Amino acid sequence: MTNENITSVLTEKRTFAPNTDFINQANLIKKEYERLLWKSGTDFEGFWAELAEKNIFWFKKWEKILEWNEPFSKWFIDGKTNVSYNCLDRHLKDKSNKPALIWIGENKEKRNLTYRELFVEVCKFSNALLKLGVKELDRIVIYMPLIPEAVVAMLACARIGAVHNVVFGGFSKEALADRINDSKAKIVITADGGYRRGQIVPLKTNVDEALKKCSSVEKVIIAQRTKNKIEIKSDRDLWYHELISNLPADNPAKELDSEHPLFILYTSGTTGKPKGILHTTGGYLLWTTITSKWIFDLKDSDVYWCTADIGWITGHSYAVYGPLSCGATVLIYEGAPNYPDWGRFWEIIEENKVNIFYTAPTAIRAFMKTGDEWIKKYDLSSLRLLGSVGEPINPEAWMWYHKNIGKEKCPIVDTWWQTETGGILISPLPGVIVTKPGSATFPLPGIFMSVVDKNGKEVKPDEGGFLVITKPWPAMLRTIYGDDERYKQTYWKRIKNAYFTGDGARKDKEGYFWLLGRVDDVIKVSGHLLSTMEVESSLVSHPFVAEAAVVGYPHDIKGEALCAFVVLKQSANTDHHLFSEELKNHVSKEIGPVAKPDQIKFTESLPKTRSGKIMRRLLRDVASGKQTLGDTTTLEDVSVLEKLRAEEEE
Ligand code: WT7
């Protein structure tokens, strides 16, 4: 970890103040914001106690707010609550007929579930899980398309204290098998298939293949979606709809400890194996609830749409738990933004009068590229707030979003957070903060962050450094599942007394935070974190490949794209062009289409230090077509670089 690469060149002068109409109706206004800031600074625990009391239903109140044995935290000790109760039961009194979910299928089907209906479905399915012998703390893998049953499955686990582990439906059978095995899941919930751009994704078949390598799984539950032919193993497989028929429509939510594990979600790490990020109950629930209220300004009349799949943390926190705990109407959409055409999102917004829209910069950049005509066809006047998440949104994309989607009247919340943080930590508050395009602005009240050098010393304004979190927060990950040591090493060892985010950042003279991307070997492709190591392992698993190094390079739409440098075995006598396609497909099959390299460069050797470490910095320069100005003196064989460049020019 060095300071190189994180010099910042952006200097953005435009500012946007919230307009009076928005301010007058905002959930969080300036005076209250200032009080919260003051309170969190002067009485940290009192601040959290007040929020937990006001925003969450507790079966039994906590005895103590926080136990902090760095890096392990416990929040709301001895408090008893239930996430599913907070998302469902507590709304039944006055919102029982309000739509909780509006589901849109890729083939334009639509299903509405009111809070009452969602409650009934969750109760039935949780009864089914109990009937199958699921106990508290059992791990349940959810590998599903974005259909209401997927949300039901998550809430049903939460209701009975089982721990869900959602695996993105776009992941391959290998990735699925790894995640099942690492979490030792007892049950897999899937569907016969899912739709993606008109094609059927064979989810159940992937499960069948994966389970050949997994011994922990006892039962597979299948929701019916595509009705394609699948194989049924009669002693193992059960249909969702058969399972819940005739089960009671009530099932009291378990009174769970505040620190009861809620879910595990795998995210890419710098070293091979993905990390199972563990989140627990009370703290996570509190933070996703209040951030939804503050940042998305959720009102009873709003239709709120977060475009993320539940396979990612954004889908967990801001398509399911946060907004449902606030009693909002949440829209979920199964398909792709460009199916059947690039007007799909705008059509959904028009038809459903969406008020709040939360998406990712990679989607925004794709829309910019396809042109305005798709947008002009639809009435977007229902929109009142826009959000962005997943990677830095560059000022051009921000301005485009502001003008073309927000019609210059919607505040934009650029929200910074991570799978590990559980909820948003840096974001504008739409009725309070003056925004600057490209800046996520300030850490929220209760969140303490700074930008430091490698010794942990705060850097000067406008200097680049490492983004760290200096106090625990309730939605923080508790550990990496089954690996406390890796948790310590990954997040808490690099900078003293702080959680290191892995991101570079700078603070300007007014204290605004500007994110500068990852500083480690993790790459963001289309908003999805990929570990270079994982892609490399997949490449070398091909019998022709001797060695591989993967780096990211800037890409117009994806943000970053993957370039793989591959050294072939001597015996491999192949046509480079054809083999390059074969390798790309190999990775796509092994990990999933998101990980498919955009470029493959064959080389005789890789640039390495004398100690044998691949010098990725140099490869990044080659991949992005830059001259290498940095230090190359540690390079073992300087000619390697020359050769790579020469091949480039061929
Ligand atoms: C990484 C975390 C947070 C949910 C989705 C991604 C990058 C995220 C922003 C933003 C700049 C951002 C960071 C972070 N990131 N949001 N608003 N501005 N960068 O979760 O897959 O765990 O990725 O995404 O690099 O560390 P994740």
Image (cartoon, rainbow, N blue to C red):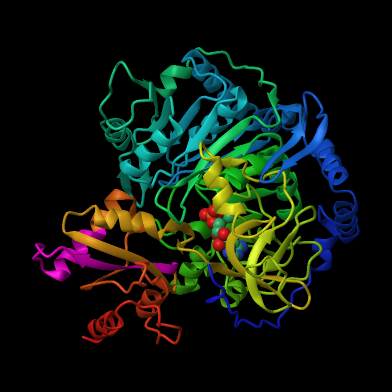
Occupied quadrant, residue 93? top right
Is 289 drawn above or below residue 134 in the view shown?
below
Question: What quarter of the picture does the C terminus occupy?
Answer: bottom left
Where does residue 242 sit, x and y in percent of width and height? 42, 18
Give x and y (percent) for residue 62.
80, 29
Q: Which of 214 and 633 is in front in this view?
A: 633
Task: Answer with left or right where residue 134 lies relative to residue 449.
Answer: left
Image location (x, y in percent) of residue 518? 53, 65
Magenta stretch holds residue 579 = yes
Q: Nearer the viewer, residue 341 or 220?
A: 220
Quadrant location, ligand no. 1: bottom right
Q: Give the range drawn in magenta.
A: 558-584
> How many numbered marks does the figure carry?
0
Residue for point 25% across, 62% down: 547
In magenta stretch: residue 186: no
- Return the residue nearer the eye: 240 or 215: 215
Query: Quadrant location of residue 636?
Result: bottom left
Q: Is residue 63 left or right of residue 540?
A: right
* Position of 400 relative to 205 (above/below): below
Q: From the top left corner, tell me how far across and down residue 20 is, in percent.
A: 84, 67
Q: Which residue is drawn at 33% across and 30% down?
A: 214
Is residue 143 depicted above or below 363 in this figure? above
> Is residue 401 at all visible to an observer of this figure?
yes
Q: Is residue 42 above or below residue 439?
A: above
Q: Is residue 379 visible?
A: no
Extreme residue in the front direction: 611
